[in-house]
Image (cartoon, rainbow, N blue to C red):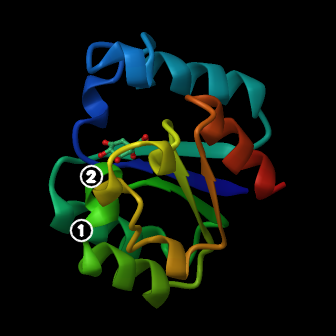
Amino acid sequence: MQILILNGPNLNLLGKREPEVYGNTTFTDYFKTLQSKFGDIQLYYFQSNIEGEIITKIQEVGFSFDGIVLNAAAYTHTSVGIGDAVKAIETPVVEVHISNTHKREEYRHVSYISPGAKGVILGFGLQSYDLAIQSFL
Ligand code: DQA
């Protein structure tokens, strides 16, 4: 089974960025935890701050992988392009967020990803990614 974890803008700063919201762990460290927990799965990780690169990656794996765990970060709330890419592919996408976006500013309550997603997991910290992977098993 091949699953891609795809992170959007500013998530490369996890561990440093607003730790009171996003925690103290870097994603590189957390990815190692996921790899050892889900040893039977081929897990891949890609992060980009650039909208077009995220769309290209979705297209690249979207007809062959078994699942995409997508945290489009700020693009969640703005990107018709990423939302359309999620709808265009065959691979199921689970949308994740570290924080509970519904408890935060109103502009974070809108998602352009959710209409095309298989499901949404949010508010469980980095564990949201773990739960999303489990949803594909
Ligand atoms: C986020 C929530 C978004 O609103 C924000 O722009 C992010 C991270 C989350 O994982 O909680 O960058 O997607």
Whether tag 1 and tag 2 are in contact, CB under 8 A, the answer is yes
The vertical placement of 125 against 45, above or below, is above
Residue 107 is situated, as x and y percent measured from the top left of the image, at 29, 58
Residue 59 placement: quadrant = bottom left
User: Helix, strand, or loop for circle 2?
Assistant: helix
Q: Report if the beta carbon of the residue with label 1 is closer than 8 angstroms to ligand 1.
A: no
Q: Could you tell whether 17 is left or right of 121 in the image? A: left
Residue density around tag 1, few if under 14, some if 14–19, many if 20 or more, within 10 Å: some
Distance CA(mark 1)–CA(mark 2): 7 Å
Amino acid at dot 1: Thr
Q: Which residue appears at 65% of the width and 31% of the height? A: 127
| Quarter in which the C terminus is drawn | bottom right
Q: In the image shown, does 25 or 108 lie closer to the viewer?
A: 108
The outermost residue toward the right is 137
Residue 113 is situated, as x and y percent measured from the top left of the image, at 44, 71
Q: Disc 2 designates what residue?
A: 74
Residue 97 is situated, as x and y percent measured from the top left of the image, at 50, 45
Q: In the image shown, does 91 or 60 lie closer to the viewer?
A: 91
* Number of residue marks: 2
Q: Could you tell whether 35 is left or right of 25 in the image? A: right
Amino acid at dot 2: Ala
Q: Report if the beta carbon of the residue with label 2 is closer than 8 angstroms to ligand 1.
A: yes
Q: Which residue appears at 61% of the width and 40% of the height? A: 129
Q: Which residue appears at 40% of the width and 43% of the height? A: 104
User: Helix, strand, or loop for circle 1?
Assistant: loop
